[in-house]
Image: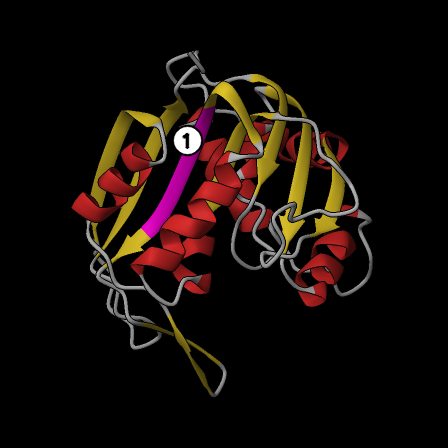
Amino acid sequence: MIGVTGHIKGDILIDLSCNSLVHQLYSACEFFKHIIVLKVNDRCILELKRWVDRRTGAFYWGHAAKLHGYFTGKSDQLQDKEGKVRSALQHVMKCDLAKENMTEPIDLPSADCIISAWLLDAISKDQDEYIQYLRKFSKLLKPGGHFILIGCLYTTYFIVGKDRLHMLRYDEDFARKALVGEGFVIDFCEVKKRSNVSDITDYKAIIFIAAHKKMET
């Protein structure tokens, strides 16, 4: 969805997403020169760097590349696409969500765009904490910059192996109000109802929001 209307683009994109996901970056690398990925734990950093460096045992993201090629009509450019993502992905960094400056002692340049996919759902214990983290994310974004939010609605858990992990339950109205309350203008919002059946998680729909940060007055 990034860049579909031609207005979400720039120099720097910061990705704050759950786990070691990269599929959201296949579109992003077409519209941003530099991508900075922030992760909250060392295992995610290790796994992502394995993929970037093409190390043995790295997770195979070819299925995501093929899907991207299918939707863009460029299925014959899969290797070029993965190479482009790796070239744009300049930094994979650890962030500490408990700190005011999450990347302390490093001060990151203000981003033109932030993507956050499912991270807020996983790290927030309640709705107040969701808003607090959203406020921190917003500080990494320049005025007028864009925020792309992807999450699951009405979720309470996600199972990984034998572990049942907490997921924050919220609805579309809350997500919209949270962004507006932190100084964002919503440009686009779409909710897609769940179509598959699985006991791994209990989400009811996926929400996609594109918004921009109000200019300072």
Q: Is residue 75 left or right of residue 183?
A: right
**Which residue is the site of mark 1?**
71
- Residue 91 left/right relative to 4: right
> Type of residue at label 1?
Phe
Q: Quadrant of the C terminus?
A: top left
Mark 1 crowdedness (10 Å alpha carbons): few <14, some 14-19, many ≥20 = few
Q: Main secondary structure of the magenta part?
A: strand
Q: Quadrant of residue 6?
A: top left
Relative to the observer, which residue lies in front, 126 or 30?
A: 126
Task: Evaluate whether residue 194 shows in this view.
Answer: yes
Q: Foreground residue, 197 or 99?
A: 99
| Residues shaded magenta | 146-151
Q: Residue at x 71, y 34 (%)?
A: 108
Displayed quadrant of residue 156:
bottom left
Q: Position of residue 35 (x, y in %)?
A: 67, 32
Residue 155 at x, y percent in the picture: 27, 65
Residue drawn at x 49%, y 35% as measured from the top left = 138
Residue 181 in the image: state x and y as whole percent.
Answer: 29, 36
User: Eyeballing the image, is 67 above or below 112?
Assistant: below
